[in-house]
Image (cartoon, rainbow, N blue to C red):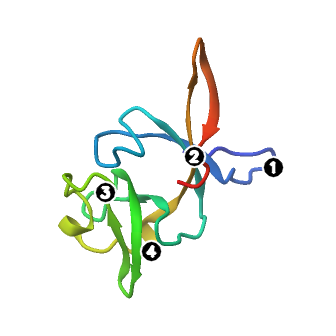
């Protein structure tokens, strides 16, 4: 998901598509979000991480609090329990980055995106 710059360095941003209802109402299925890879988390930030039990699966959740054994991640949609209530804290090494903006197509201009909600 990260790109490469000229000279071989990693680009610290990437775009990720939201899948599923777990982050409703703030983020919806099909939304595109801008992720800053390697960004430090703080409580209440939306984080991108590898699922603790299925590392091939990337997950977006809200970082509720930092615990000694990792981050406690929660769905915004409390009816969806596929979060730390199910799989426990997420180890720091599984956290990939922080969502910094939501992107979506402008009305009437498909393929063009604009940032909104800069403090997700």
* Residue where numbered disc 1 is placed: 7
- Where residue 12 sits, quadrant-wise, is bottom right
In three-dimensional space, the C-alpha distance between marks 3 and 2, rounded to whole angstroms, equals: 18 Å
Residue extending furthest bottom? 68
Q: Single out the mark in the foreground, 3 or 2.
A: 2
* Residue where numbered disc 4 is placed: 92
* Residue where numbered disc 2 is placed: 117
Residue 32, image x and y in percent?
50, 36
In three-dimensional space, the C-alpha distance between marks 1 and 3, rounded to whole angstroms, equals: 38 Å
- Split into 4 quadrants, where in the image is the N terminus? top right
In this view, the residue in front, 31 or 88, is: 31
Residue 77, image x and y in percent?
28, 51
Mark 4 burial class by Cα count in 10 Å: few <14, some 14-19, many 20+: some
- Where residue 91 sits, quadrant-wise, is bottom left
Q: Is residue 108 left or right of residue 91?
A: right
- Where residue 85 sits, quadrant-wise, is bottom left
Residue 66, image x and y in percent?
42, 80
Q: Which mark is residue 75?
A: 3
Q: Residue at x 18, y 65 (%)?
A: 86
In three-dimensional space, the C-alpha distance between marks 2 and 4, rounded to whole angstroms, equals: 25 Å
Q: Is residue 53 left or right of residue 36?
A: left
Mark 3 burial class by Cα count in 10 Å: few <14, some 14-19, many 20+: many
Q: Earlier in the sequence, mark 2 or mark 1?
A: 1
Q: Residue at x 38, y 78 (%)?
A: 70
Q: Earlier in the sequence, mark 1 or mark 4?
A: 1
Q: Earlier in the sequence, mark 1 or mark 3?
A: 1
In three-dimensional space, the C-alpha distance between marks 2 and 1, rounded to whole angstroms, equals: 32 Å
In this view, the residue in front, 96 or 4, is: 96
Q: Residue at x 34, y 44 (%)?
A: 24
Q: Earlier in the sequence, mark 3 or mark 2?
A: 3
Q: Single out the mark in the foreground, 2 or 1.
A: 2
């Amino acid at each position: 998901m990260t790109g490469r710059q000229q000279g071989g360095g990693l680009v610290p941003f990437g775009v990720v598509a939201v899948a599923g209802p777990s982050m409703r109402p703030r983020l919806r299925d099909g939304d595109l979000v801008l992720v800053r890879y390697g960004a430090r988390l703080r409580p209440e930030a939306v984080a991108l991480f590898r699922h603790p039990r299925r590392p091939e699966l990337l997950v977006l959740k809200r970082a509720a609090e930092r615990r000694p054994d990792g981050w406690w991640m929660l769905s915004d949609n409390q009816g969806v329990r596929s979060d730390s209530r199910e799989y426990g804290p997420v180890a720091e090494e599984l956290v990939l980055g922080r969502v910094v903006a939501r992107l979506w197509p402008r009305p009437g201009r498909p393929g063009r995106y604009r940032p909104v909600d800069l403090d997700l």
